[in-house]
Image (cartoon, coloured by chain):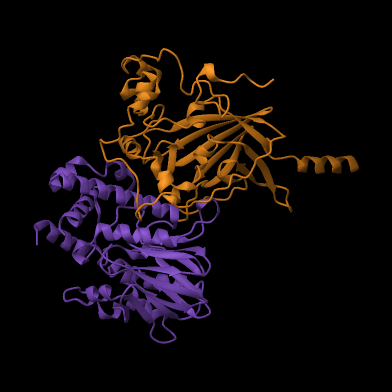
Chain colours: A purple, B orange
Amino acid sequence: MTRSALIILGFAVSLFAQAPQNYDDVKVNILPVQGSVYMLIGAGGNTTLQVGKDGVLLVDTQYAPMAPKIMAAVRTLSQMPIKYIINTHMHGDHTGGNGALVKLGAGGGMPRIIANDHALNRMTAAGSNIPDSDWPNDEYFGNSKDFFFNNEAVVVYHMPNAHTDGDSVVFFRRSDVIAAGDIFTPEHYPIIDLARGGSVQGIIDALNRIIDITVPARYQEGGTYVIPGHGRLCEEADVVEYRDMVTIIRDRIADLIKKGRTLEQVRAARPTLDYDTQYGATTGIWTTDQFVEAVYRSLSEK
Amino acid sequence: MRGLLLAVMIAGALPAFAQVDFSGEWAPLYHEDGPERLPGPELGDYTELPINDAARMRADSYDADRISVVPEYQCRPHGADYSMRGLGNLRIWREYDESTQKLIAFHTHLLAWDSERTIYMDGRPHPPEYADHTWQGFSTGVWEGNMLTITTTHLKTNYIRRNGVPRSDKATLVEHWYRHGDYLTVVTVITDPVFLTEPLVRSDNWFLDPGQAIGVFGCEYAPEVPRPTGTVPHHLPGTNSFLHEFADWYGLPYEATRGGAETLYPEYRSRMGKYTPPAKCDRYCTCTTLFNCNLAPANLAPPPR
């Protein structure tokens, strides 16, 4: 394993652990999306909430200390027990509240915590330090899993080797809303967790599948809504912009690799310059340099 | 006493502020920036745009094939900051609260893409940052004397020129609407921290045309070109062979076509390099309608009698 790969691995392990912040000041905002689906914005990834006569379904659970606030937000919309939690992937900013929310909101028996089997494997691997109370108890294998809940079909699609190797996208078919997880993060470049099976091509493939599912309404807006892993509520056109960005940067870096450029030469060529003011960062958890390196390694270390 | 009561009732019916009625059918005037607005901008023409390096590179890599090859682009409408510059046959109407007779909103309908927009006048706040963005954004208006000033946020990423120069979803659009008799002037100010180094100010005009009938635009996207899934046409850096066309056709120094705040002001002419105007104008120089823009003056049909 190269030194850079080790750095990325170390980064990936630490990045999504519980962030050292004061959660007392964090408010959970509720945004009605469409049909039975709401978006909860707090700390960590976005949480998707579906409520109805059958109970409560959550997609992703933010960090553990956020659980009481998430539960309080849920209770403003439903007094029914949590029946399902679906994790879009294994990182702690999306799964950290699993166990705490099960304790707070189960009521009607143990909720099912659904995730792709690769996500479960990563969470239960030696050294992951993820408590077993947060582990999925209903992993699925293969391309998808579906069930009927709150009067609509809920389809969980596996998106292989994208942000990680265990990514899922959740489609609420009657409400016409997608929870995309960290495959789609319009606030910043996509985080490609190479150490956990992520790849730039997997991100692009997953974004294209989301675009295939979404259908805009009149004026090319509305229709299918997309809740990103982080950032504001979106629609198909926003996913298209993001897909274009990742595709174009992939093509540029692939062209430079084809010409024999080293990573440092690729960085010096600034293949992301036109997107940096929109998605880039020089500090923080995912910098432009890290993104360029991840794309470079994803394309060159096959 | 009866007279006093009547006077009070009349006074109560008067608007609290000067309120101009923009309602009606408005036909666009294209005397400003006609070639850009009717036939469309030349590739590589970034003049008059205070863009940064990111916007310039984004536009350089833009390939217009994207519109034909990628179905999701085929029916993509103009944003609120651009829609009035395009095929701008415009209808404006007012919406009132039935119980209070206070103005709730102005609504607009534009020919291009049948775009409709609401400008709220009832003082409601803009949505939170995490709310959805739309092509027309979220607009609120306030009166400043007889001028209506409109602030629009929550725009989707789009273009400020239809040759690939981008405008981000973090931009804010401020408009000033003036009515002078049968003429409407709209001044737009776009502030974009992602792609502009200073605000971009433009203006457009219409005249009142009560007999105007706006047809249905209609648009249905469909795959028209066989292509692999996820194809995104673009030019790799340094490979766009069209970027010099504009400078060559109009005899401009290439650097002067690249945009940037420094090129907006008159003093730039003294240092922009040699300008050699073409011997005669034969490209987009005589537009009077959308349909004769590409003709040289000698080929123009005489006006109808």
Residue at (38% x, 50% y) in the render: A241
Q: Give the vertical position of B142 relative to A56 (above or below).
A: above
Q: Give the vertical position of B133 relative to B290 (above or below).
A: below
Work out which quarter of the rendered image holds the N terminus of chain A and state it.
Answer: bottom left
Residue extending furthest toward the right = B2
Q: Indicate the position of residue B52 as horizontal and vertical percent values.
A: 33, 34
Residue at (47% x, 74% y) in the render: A153
Residue extending furthest toward the top = B279
- Residue A302 in view of the camera: yes
> Which of the two residues, A22 or B4, is positioned nearer the viewer here?
A22
Q: Indicate the position of residue A142 as horizontal and vertical percent values.
A: 31, 75
- Residue B115 in view of the camera: no
Q: Give the vertical position of B68 relative to A4 (above or below).
A: above
Q: Is A133 on the left-hand or right-hand side of B107? A: left
Work out which quarter of the rendered image holds the C terminus of chain A and state it.
Answer: bottom left
Q: Indicate the position of residue A235 as horizontal and vertical percent values.
A: 45, 56
Q: How many marks?
A: 0
Q: Indicate the position of residue A263 as horizontal and vertical percent values.
A: 14, 48
Q: Give the vertical position of A101 relative to A230 (above or below).
A: below
Q: Is A226 on the left-hand or right-hand side of A217? A: left
Residue extending furthest toward the bottom = A109
> Which of the two residues, B230 or B145, is positioned nearer the viewer here?
B230
Location of residue A135 (image quadrant): bottom left
Residue at (41% x, 49% y) in the render: B225
Q: Is A25 on the left-hand or right-hand side of B173? A: left
